[in-house]
Each structure stands twice: as structure tokens, then as C-alpha cells.
Image (cartoon, rainbow, N blue to C red):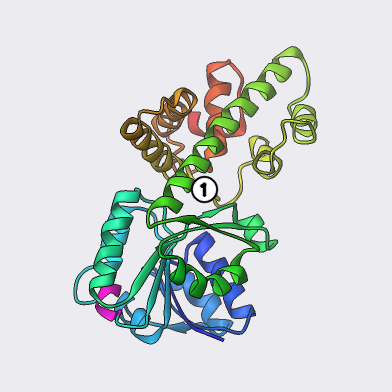
Amino acid sequence: MAKVGFIGLGVMGSQMVNRLLSKGHTVTGYNRTHSKAQWLIGKGMQWADSPRAVASASEYTFAMVTNAAAIRAITEGPDGLLAGLGPGKFYVDMSTVSPAVSRALAAKVRERGADMVDSPVSGSVITLQEGKLSVMVGGRRETFEKVKPLLLDIGPKVTYVGDNGLALSMKIATNLSLAVQMLAFSEGVLLAEKSGIAREVAVDVLTHSAVASPMIQYRGPFVLQQPEEAWFDVNMMQKDMVLAMDLGRQLEVPLPTTAVSNEFLTAARGMGLAKLDFACMFDVLAAMSGVSTPVTEGVAK
């Protein structure tokens, strides 16, 4: 069993810690909001007062935070995790940021005598809870082999994709399809609904049809009712779409459906839906189609 640290106990991070605890690992955690960690502390997670304290107490330190600014906040300064790293330690960054940001951070980690891999995931809180999460890893292969057993305790599919930053390129290439699929699904639902088919029936048919990817199967029903807490909100989805378009420009790969889908996320923010699950792209298209939804009725009030 390993001494594991985890920084960032949001929807996904907290469930990962829960899985690591269930496998018998000693886990030390930190989160900006202490109250979100209370249920994990009740399950045996040890609390640390800073990212540095997490890294100091752990052989393997994981982090999953929202963006590049959040990574800087947890890594830099006297209380940052970099200050707690040293020879023989490993940092696994599961955040989704640009490959360039990740590579620069890996260089700083190595200056401390430690090593780092980028290890973003594909899936949702449901796939994580069901033990179906897919994990991608970029970095030195020997470091990948050391962290792989822990990653397998989080998800059953762990793939080494190459050097530092390449797992993030793979994650970005994967995530752009989420919004694109959601928009196409919304088009199908609304076309059926305006033809006279009940929305619930259209959703049921499409989520059991040939177009029903795993993402559509678990997120499609959100067009009927949003979850109480967003699994992946509009702001987070748009961050990944912008990363994809930036990477596309750098590599001279046109991303037309990504660009169109991104505009619907911008429209969702303009309608005040930024904190909802990005499945609210349906509500944006519905409003454009003259169709009301519980979400848009709530905005109108």
C-alpha cells in the first residue's frame, strides 16, 4: 500500500480519493474548501493544511484542479506542492491544461529531484464510481510504470501515450467530441419534438440507438432534467474547447464542429447558464427553436 497525496477534492477528485481509500492506501488530502473533504476524513483520509504538507507526507502526490491558474496556486510559493517534493517522489497531475503548461511544470518538478506525469482522464463521475474510467499518461515510461498500479486502482483502463504533455493532447482531442456530440444529440431531440414526438420518447429512442455513445447514454437524460450538481459545467467544457481550438491553430488542424459547438457554450454563458452541466446546450438550441424548457423558464423568471 502506498502513501498517496491528493490535492483538489471536487466532484471527480473526491471520488478518486474514495477509491484509493477503498484499496487500502493511506491518503493525505487538501482542498481549498475544507467542508468538501469532511466525508472523506470520516472515511479515513488524513487532512493537510497546504499542498506542500500533502507532498511532504506522500510518495505519490496527485492533483486535479480546474485550470492553469489553479495549478499555479497549488504548486508555487512556500506552501506550494513543489516545495514539498524531493528525490524519490512522484507528482501525477490529472488537471486538463495546455500541454505547454504541463511540460513547463514537469521541468520544475525535476529540478526538485522528483518526477511528474500528466494523467488526465476520460469519463464522468458515474463511470468513475462504476470503475470504468479511462486514464491517459504522458511522461517518462519508467515513471509511468511506477504510478500505473495506483492509476489502475482509480480506473481499469490506463494507457501510456508518450512524453510529457501528450496525454493532455489526447485528452483535449477526446473532450472536444463531448460538446460536439451533445449539440448533435440536441438537434435530433428538437427535430423530433417539433415533429410532434414527446421529448421523453425522443430521448429514450436516441439513447438506445446507434448514435448512443457512452456519453450520450448518461448525459442525454439531462435534457429532461439537469443534475442537482453539474458533472461538468459550461465553463469547464468551454475551457477544454478553447484548448482544443488553440491546439488546432498551432498544429494547423481545422476544427469546424468544435468551433460551432463552442459558440453554443458562449451563448449558454450569455443566458446565465454557466454553472449548469454543459448538457444545457440543448436549452440554448431549444430557445433558438422556440421551444421552452424548465431551464429557460427558470431564466425567464
Of residue 158 and residue 161, the one placed in the foreground of this image is 161
Of residue 144 and residue 226, the one placed in the foreground of this image is 144
| The quarter of the displayed image where residue 113 is located | bottom left
Residue 167 drawn above or below residue 106: above
Magenta stretch: helix, strand or loop mostly: helix
The residue lying at 35 percent from left, 53 percent from top is 67
Residue 285 part of the magenta-drawn span? no
Q: Report the residue that reaches farthest toward the top.
A: 195
Range of the magenta residues? Answer: 80-85
| 225 to the left or right of 268 | right
Circle 1 residues within 10 Å: few <14, some 14–19, many ≥20: some
| 33 to the left or right of 39 | left
| 1 to the left or right of 202 | left
| The quarter of the displayed image where residue 214 is located | top right
Task: Residue type at mark 1: give it.
Answer: Phe
Residue 300 at what x, y percent from top left? 49, 28
Per the image, label 1 sits on a secondary structure element best described as loop
The residue lying at 61 percent from left, 42 percent from top is 226
Residue 179 at what x, y percent from top left? 53, 34
Of residue 298 and residue 261, the one placed in the foreground of this image is 261
Residue 162 at what x, y percent from top left? 45, 55
Residue 36 drawn above or below residue 265: below
Q: Quadrant of the N terminus?
A: bottom right
Residue denoted by label 1: 232
The residue lying at 42 percent from left, 51 percent from top is 166
Residue 97 at what x, y percent from top left? 36, 51
